Amino acid sequence: MKKQLHLFFTALLFYTRIPCPKHIDHHPDSLNKPSRYFPLIGWIVGFIFFGIFYLSSLLFDTNIAIVLALIASILTTGAFHEDGFADVCDGFGGGWTKEKILHIMKDSAIGAYGAIGLVLLFLLKFTVLLQLFSISSQLNNAFLILALLCISGHSISRLAAISIVFTHQYVREDALSKSKPIAQHYSWKEVAGAFFFGLVPLCILAFFEWKMLLVLLPIWITRSYLAHYFTKWIGGYTGDCLGATQQVCEIIFYLSVIGLWKFI
């Protein structure tokens, strides 16, 4: 149990800005092991997102509450995944060879593709969340369902991202990458743990809305396409690719939920 707590806090330290015990560090030997807890971090981020949204909605309208909740989630993760998304936009938008793409993604400066990508990402996420909250507020058990939706969106999208680690090759060759230590070695326990923590919130949600399980199909298709796209251009994935996958799959989750409620 003590070892697992250490691995959990290692994941929490690496993927968020939440304070952790002082003895937890970013040692590569520890960072290779806590991939099973990546979707569990999504529970925490999703809970914070929903909590800030709910409290803010008591004082402000839904638009402001969503923006404040988005700010809270970004502050919680330190824009870790959004940064990866922007780097992927810059790298694959401006590079035409593997070497050029990797070089651009490693550059800390944000380019036109990254800036435009982030603007469109947040615009789409805000619009989708606004419609999602509007629809869910009309359901029975609206409070609980909305909380589960927020947590599920963050956990299932992190599962989609980390699953790429289990099936594809890491391509960053230098030790300078900020995401170099991510899950280069794993066992069946990491795979089973990641799927458990990634799917539990969605399974609980399915008790209220069984059709929510159908969102797994578009998320898996999106994840598979992105993994194929990354492999086609650079031969595998980088940490930035995982961040981009998380952001895209989170939005695909929300879009899929809205589609299911409207047409099924």
Image (spheres, helix red, strand yellow):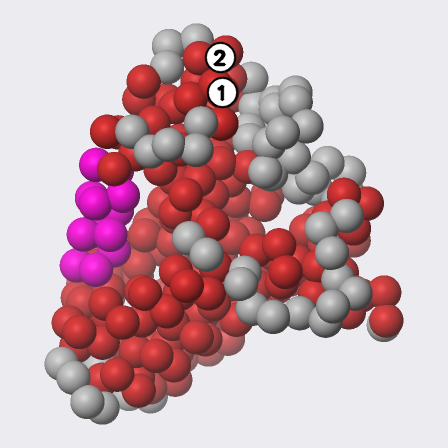
Nearer mark to the viewer, of 2 and 1: 1
Residue 14 visible, this angle? yes
Q: Is residue 55 above or below residue 255?
A: below
Q: Nearer the viewer, residue 209 or 241?
A: 241
Q: Which amino acid does label 2 sit on?
A: Lys
In x, y percent, where is residue 225? 42, 31
Q: Is residue 23 above or below residue 220?
A: below
Label 2: which secondary element: helix
Residue 145 falls left or right of residue 17: left
Q: Which of 226 and 184 is in front in this view?
A: 184
The label shown at residue 98 is 2
Magenta stretch, main secondary structure class = helix
- The answer for how far apart the CA atoms under marks 2 and 1 are is 6 Å
The label shown at residue 102 is 1
In the image, the segment drawn in magenta is 116-127
Residue in the image at 15% along x and 72% along y = 63
Q: Is residue 18 above or below residue 96?
A: below
Label 1: which secondary element: helix
Q: Is residue 22 above or below residue 39?
A: below
Is 174 a magenta residue? no
